[in-house]
């Protein structure tokens, strides 16, 4: 309460200073701007300035999303691999954090969020040109664009990190890093523009001219589907780990995996609630639905194990929690809490069968179940969003989608799902063969793979006797 009161006082005092030169807004205009600030809508006066409450919330959310990768995903994946490869997956998470940040600065943010074509932005904001503390009204009325760009950078960092899980323990560090650099440029940046860019091909909420009028609150298609389907294709192209199916390959530390799961859950509040681009009612709805879907997802997966295998496992509960977080991501700021409960049940049961029955039936080596959780879960979540999204939770659905919400929105979601799958799969196939040729192979030698990638790629080990 006190923070909002202080913000209001600062706002009322600062408004005349921030106004256009030579013009001093009257008290009524300033009060209307203050009301717009509290409800997180564009100020009627047109005076764009950072709002301290919304700005600080998004800075916290950006830190939470980075927390998902470092240390959350690093520990989650690190615990699931064998001890000889624990540093390998952590090094991949660390390397991506630096490389993607540089790409984002150089051209990634511009391709994703500047205006351009429906498929990609132009390079007008390359090297973050003119990205300063003034809000970009295309994306937020009150959050500084430099803060918004850093928030979106954290999404860009974790997305390729998810792919690491499917091909863990059998990809050369150099080849994988090159592949993911190219994948970001070819797949992620354009997809982010298509779904979230102001003139995006699939941005049904904000682009009245969108060809596919789909919705994706925080990354069902952009993050989970793109990485999940690409991960499956890459796993198939790379082939199975040496000894897969004939040698035991249990996780070396479920303790690390459980700790990483907790960090992912905490960080995911930044991922989903932060995607409202402000501290408002939509953000609080996303916060609540995220909590419930994750909790029910963990219970549902454990319940499915209890029924089929007679014992609920810690790994199952961790997987179900992550599954719930994945499935709710595209829907979080569009659905009721009751809908989140339904999504949670499906998020535990469907990915459970994808990671057990389907993977065993088809025989592919998705090492850490990236496809089963993120590919299947993200696809299901994107589709279910089309059925459960409601303007009573997010009034923005009434801007350009009145004719489809509650009617044919699920068909638009299917179109977005199909496009994302085809685009991600084809790009991954092409990039795989390019990288394989450049790096003279994507996989390490059999000797290096048996020794472990910690030693062969990094010359160090995670544990000493």
Image: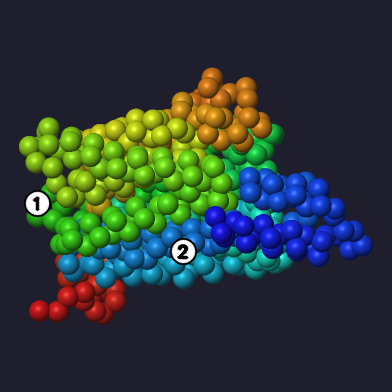
Residue 420 in the image, given as x and y percentages of width and height: 49, 40
Q: Residue at x 19, y 50 (%)?
A: 315
* Relative to 77, residue 101 above or below: below
Crowd band around label 1 with a 10 angstrom C-alpha radius: few (<14), some (14–19), many (20+)? few
Q: Nearer the viewer, mark 2 or mark 1?
A: 2
* Relative to 132, residue 241 above or below: above
Closer to the camera, 258 or 177? 258
Residue 23 makes an appearance in the image: yes
* Relative to 453, residue 325 above or below: above
Which residue was labeled with disc 1? Answer: 246
Secondary structure type for disc 2: helix
Q: CA distance from mark 2 to mark 1?
A: 42 Å
In the rendered image, the residue lying farthest to the left is: 310
Crowd band around label 2 with a 10 angstrom C-alpha radius: few (<14), some (14–19), many (20+)? some
Closer to the camera, 294 or 38? 38
Q: Residue at x 38, y 39 (%)?
A: 327
* Relative to 79, residue 95 above or below: below
Residue 29 in the image, given as x and y percentages of width and height: 81, 49
Closer to the camera, 161 or 271? 271
């Amino acid at each position: 309460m006190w923070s909002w009161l202080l913000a209001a006082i600062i706002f009322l005092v600062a408004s005349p200073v921030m106004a256009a030169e030579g013009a001093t807004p009257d008290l009524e205009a300033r009060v209307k701007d203050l009301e717009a600030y509290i409800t997180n809508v564009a100020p009627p006066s047109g005076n764009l300035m950072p709002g301290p409450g919304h700005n600080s919330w998004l800075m916290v959310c950006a830190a939470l999303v980075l927390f998902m990768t470092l240390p959350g995903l690093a520990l989650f994946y690190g615990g699931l691999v064998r001890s000889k490869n624990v540093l390998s997956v952590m090094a991949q998470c660390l390397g991506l954090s630096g490389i993607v940040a540089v790409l984002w600065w150089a051209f990634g943010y511009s391709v994703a969020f500047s205006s351009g074509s429906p498929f990609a932005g132009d390079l007008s904001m390359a090297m973050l040109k003119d990205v300063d503390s003034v809000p970009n009204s295309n994306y937020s009325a009150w959050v500084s664009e430099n803060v918004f760009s850093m928030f979106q950078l954290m999404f860009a960092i974790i997305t390729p990190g998810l792919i690491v899980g499917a091909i863990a323990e059998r990809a050369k560090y150099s080849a994988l890093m090159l592949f993911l650099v190219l994948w970001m440029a070819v797949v992620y940046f354009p997809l982010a523009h298509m779904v979230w860019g102001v003139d995006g091909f699939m941005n049904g909420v904000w682009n009245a001219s969108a060809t596919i009028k789909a919705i994706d609150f925080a990354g069902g298609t952009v993050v989970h589907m793109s990485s999940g389907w690409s991960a499956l294709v890459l796993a198939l192209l790379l082939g199975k780990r040496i000894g897969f199916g004939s040698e035991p390959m249990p996780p070396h530390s479920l303790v690390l995996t459980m700790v990483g799961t907790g960090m992912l859950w905490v960080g995911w509040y930044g991922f989903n609630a932060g995607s409202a681009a402000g501290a408002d009612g939509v953000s609080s709805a996303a916060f609540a639905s995220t909590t419930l879907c994750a909790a029910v997802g963990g219970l549902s997966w454990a319940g499915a194990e209890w029924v089929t295998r007679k014992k609920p496992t810690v790994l199952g509960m961790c997987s179900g929690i992550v599954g719930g977080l994945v499935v709710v991501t595209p829907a979080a700021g569009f659905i009721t809490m009751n809908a989140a409960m339904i999504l949670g049940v499906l998020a535990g049961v469907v990915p459970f069968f994808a990671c057990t029955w389907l993977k065993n039936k088809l025989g592919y080596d998705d090492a850490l179940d990236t496809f089963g959780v993120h590919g299947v879960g993200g696809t299901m979540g994107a589709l279910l969003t089309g059925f459960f999204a409601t303007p009573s939770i997010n009034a923005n659905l009434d801007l350009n989608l009145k004719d489809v919400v509650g009617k044919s929105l699920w068909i638009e979601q299917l179109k977005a799902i199909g496009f994302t799958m085809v685009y991600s799969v084809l790009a991954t196939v092409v990039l795989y063969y390019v990288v394989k040729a450049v790096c003279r192979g994507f996989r390490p030698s059999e000797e290096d793979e048996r020794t472990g990638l910690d030693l062969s790629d990094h010359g160090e080990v995670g544990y000493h006797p």
